[in-house]
Image: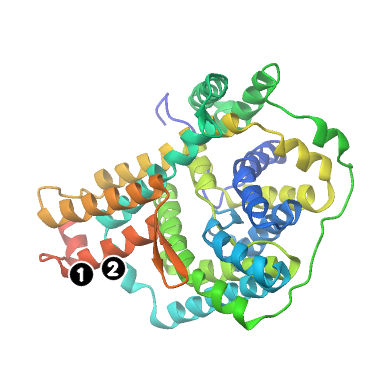
Amino acid sequence: MAKNEREVIGVDDRVPVSRAIPLGIQHMMSMFGSTVLVPVLTGLDPNVAIMCSGIGTICYLLVTRNKIPSYLGSSFAFISPIIAVGATKGLDAAMSGVICAGIVFLIVAGIVKLVGTGWLDRLLPPVLVASVMVVIGVGLSATAANMAFMNGTTFDGTYSLVAAITLFAAVMFSTMGGIFGTVPVLLAIVIGYVVAVPFGLVDFSPVVEAAWIGLPSISAPRFDLGAIVIIAPVAIVTVIEHIGHLLAVGEICDRDFRPMLPRSLAGDGLSTIISGFLGGPPTTTYAENIGVMSVTRVYSTQIFWYAGGFALIVGGFCPKISALIRSIPSPVMGGVCLLLFGLIASNGLRMFVTNKVDFDENRNLMIASVVIILGVGMETAGLSIPIGGYTLPGMATSTLVGIILNLVLPGRKEPEEEGAAAE
């Protein structure tokens, strides 16, 4: 190993508990803000969402036989339909739609199991997968930038300073060896939090008021056909996003997870079903945690067991710790996310290189150009395409357009031909 290269901890590797604990906490902290935001916007209980993310991650690891390192948090794709159903039929009815969305995942997983995953190679060549990875990372850049620099709708110099210090700390720690190099995100969040305190950006009152031990407000679903019709079909959009995330994780870990797609989809579906029965939002794999793996080069699924366990405990039984984590200021998480999302995009660029994508070939140039600009443009502008009562977000739209371009543009190579050319 070169002197400036950090240790790589593989998917099946194990680390001592003393290292696994901070690594697990790091993943939990990375997903926390986004996972809490979904229930805040939809009216669901944030603690239930955190607890369900932990349960869902553990369920996912079991279903995938501990082979795919991923964390499952609250899905943003369902925010609008849950709000709509909640306002007219009640959140308990919305949960029936969440449960059926999970069932849609299981149905798709069954279909993929029957037909195989060979179609992925034909529909998603390296140029398209790499482009989607760029879209995932850069498409989230506006979210990270708003968190880092904006106080509401106004640019805030204090926010920017705190975000810059946090980002600098994350970058510096990530270049170090030992424990510093494996938990740079966690250490950066701690430093950013400490820096934010004297600026008055931390509100400790919810932490003081929260109990040390308590139970979340679990609620039972009420099955409603109208709610199911509105919410369940959104799962098709999240299936597309799920495939994109799975391919991104495979590229970062240097493993081919495509044969495990049925299990991955089933794990996500079961997680969503459990969340719906407990009163939580639908779950999905998280880009934030993909970014953490990229910066730390720690891919062990063991760490995600710890992360899921911590989330289960914090969300389910310890309101005070949950309130403490929720008190982390927006610019602190924004500074960290600037690095995490950028790394996902950078891995997409690396995939262009490692797969020797030839941009002198016009079809590759067209696919990459259209997918990246369409996806990034829609995601950063907050645009989505309305389809009946549903919306198609930027990543899903650009992926579908890329698939169509790959099928209709002349000169498409079959996977066998591409492999032979690489040799």
Q: Position of residue 309 (x, y in %)?
A: 73, 52
Foreground pick, 165 / 385 = 385
* Residue 314: mark in rendering: none
**Count of marks, rendered view:** 2
Does residue 363 appear left or right of residue 273 in this picture? left
Residue 144's spot in the image, x, y percent?
49, 37
Q: Is residue 183 visible?
A: no
**Furthest residue in direction top, as rendered:** 198
Q: Nearer the viewer, residue 305 or 213?
A: 213
Side of 242 where 423 appears, left or right: left
Under circle 2, the secondary element is helix
Q: Position of residue 241 (x, y in %)?
A: 44, 60
Picture residue at 58% right of the left edge, 34% below the top: 333
The reply to whether discs 2 and 1 touch (Cβ–Cβ < 8 Å) is yes
Where residue 405 appears, as percent x and y from the top left, is 21, 64
Q: State which quadrant residue 65 falls in.
A: bottom right
Instruction: State the residue position of label 1.
Output: 407
The amino acid type found where label 2 is placed reads Leu
370 and 124: which one is in front? 370
Residue at the limit of the structure toward the front, as seen here: 88
> Is 250 rendered above or below residue 144?
below
The C terminus, quarter of image: bottom left
Q: Which residue is mark 2?
A: 123
- 206 vs 105, nearest the viewer: 206
The answer to whether 362 is drawn above or below residue 331 in the figure is: below
Check the picture and name the quadrant holding the N terminus: top left
Q: Secondary structure at mark 1?
A: helix
Crowdedness near tag 2: few (<14), some (14–19) or many (≥20) residues, C-alpha within 10 Å: some
